[in-house]
Amino acid sequence: MIIIMLTLTLGETVLAVAVHHYFYGGIRDTLIEHAEDANTLYRRFNDRIILNHWSNSLSEVMDNFRLKGTTLFIYNADGSMIASSTGVISSSSIKTDSELLGGNPLSRVEYLPQTKEKVMSLYYPIQIKGKLFILRYVSSLARVDRDLLLILIVSLLSGVGIALLVFFVSLKLAQSIVMPIKHIINVSSKMAVGNFSIRIKQDYRNELGVLARTLNAMADEIQKNERLQNTFISSVSHDLLTPLTGIKGWSETMLMNKDTTPEEFREGLNVISKESDRLKQLVGDLLDLSKLKQNTLALNRQKTRLDEVLKQAVASVQIKAAAKGCQVIVNSSKKMIAEVDGNRLQQVIVNLLDNAIKFSHADTQIIADLAEDEATIRLSVKDWGIIVDAKEIPKLTDPFYQTRANGRGSGLGLAISKNIVDLHGGRLSIKSTPETGTDAVIVLPKNIKPN
């Protein structure tokens, strides 16, 4: 606002100076132009007239050089008045300087001695018969000053009006910016102390709207992470407690019951071994998930035969598949090589096969298919078991998410698998329909470098 006021003040000052110069300069130019034109005509037609104090030709000079609206005086070279358009000859004289005596016109803003009226005086030297005479045109500036004052008042009022308009527009504009910012600051301050249930209005325009949506998205993400953290604690506590309960129960039974038979002893050790393996698997998954979230999981990439990796993964789940009566069929008769981390990729394939076995019905088939083109390798694991609801499919790769159809396991397998596939520059997708069954597909780039 200060800058605008300074600009308006500067504009008013420049306008006042320019208008003043225009009006005063116009009067001066008009007087000079008339004097020059009259002098030209006079020298052409009246060159023989002799001027003196008693000559009747002074009236003819007055008639030739007179200008309506001005008073004309004639002075001789020493500055004494010899004629006047008013008929009154004053004894006062004018000061003649070298510029006038040299034949150059001179204009001044003066004040009349008697009335103190402000006037524009033009001193114009003329030569008649080799003698120098000075014409003095006197034009009142009272009307011009009134017009200038009126213009100045109008311009000042206009400036004040513009200033008020700019002030109210600036105030409105400032409020449209400051009020949303205050609202954003107020809400974000509450978010800063942990209240993520409130939201910022998102109907603001331009960058403020983007900022509001960004902060709201941040709050949503924080709430999501809080829910994930709570789910993590609940899931890990449950998954750790279940095997620990079995281990503790059987260990106490074997220690306290002296009548335990060798068969019961072996059964207890078997349970302890399986639950220990389950704990080991859960802890390993948690470590892998932590590394993936912190981007510290390093891949050991090298040229790997994916057909061999697939066969090894299938072999590791054959016992579990057979126990459920499922048959795992591998469709891969071709050697396929890609630059991948074989161990991590086998971990992904085992997880997909394990999920397929869990969701499959007894005495059904699971198809593991491996195909390639010039740039990518496509691996799919397909079953015709329990169909996953379409609303649940996008959540399957979220940590600790478990479908209603299963509800078993830690819920980490697919989350880890997706992150491992992403690290390879590939993608993992899942489709599940009653017509085609459930199909988990991995697409990987070959990334084979020349030797």
Image (cartoon, rainbow, N blue to C red):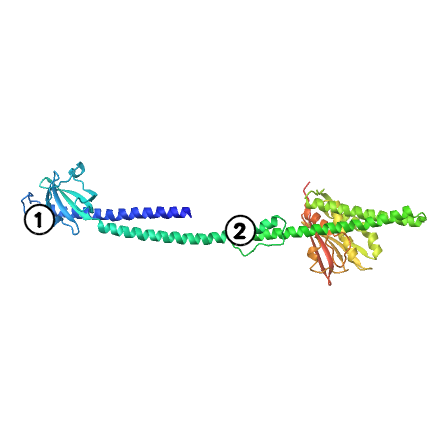
Pinpoint residue 210: horizontal percent, then vertical percent.
55, 52
Which of the 4 image quarters holds residue 75?
Answer: top left
Pinpoint residue 152: horizontal percent, then vertical percent.
30, 50
Q: Nearer the viewer, residue 336 or 85?
A: 85
Please tell me whether residue 291 is drawn above or below residue 392 in the rendered image: above
Residue projecting furthest to the top: 98
Q: Earlier in the sequence, mark 1 or mark 2?
A: 1
- Residue at 41%, 52% (x, y): give it: 166
What is the number of callouts on the image?
A: 2
Q: Is residue 36 visible?
A: no
Q: Which residue is mark 1?
A: 59
- Residue at 8%, 48% (x, y): give it: 59
Mark toward the viewer: 1 or 2: 2
Residue projecting furthest to the bottom: 435
Q: Nearer the viewer, residue 420 or 97?
A: 97
Pinpoint residue 329: horizontal percent, then vertical percent.
79, 55
Q: Which residue is mark 2?
A: 182
- Residue at 34%, 53% (x, y): give it: 157
Q: Nearer the viewer, residue 143 or 429?
A: 143
Q: Nearer the viewer, residue 321 or 394?
A: 394
Is 96 on the left-hand or right-hand side of 165?
A: left
Q: Marks 1 and 2, how far apart in space?
A: 83 Å
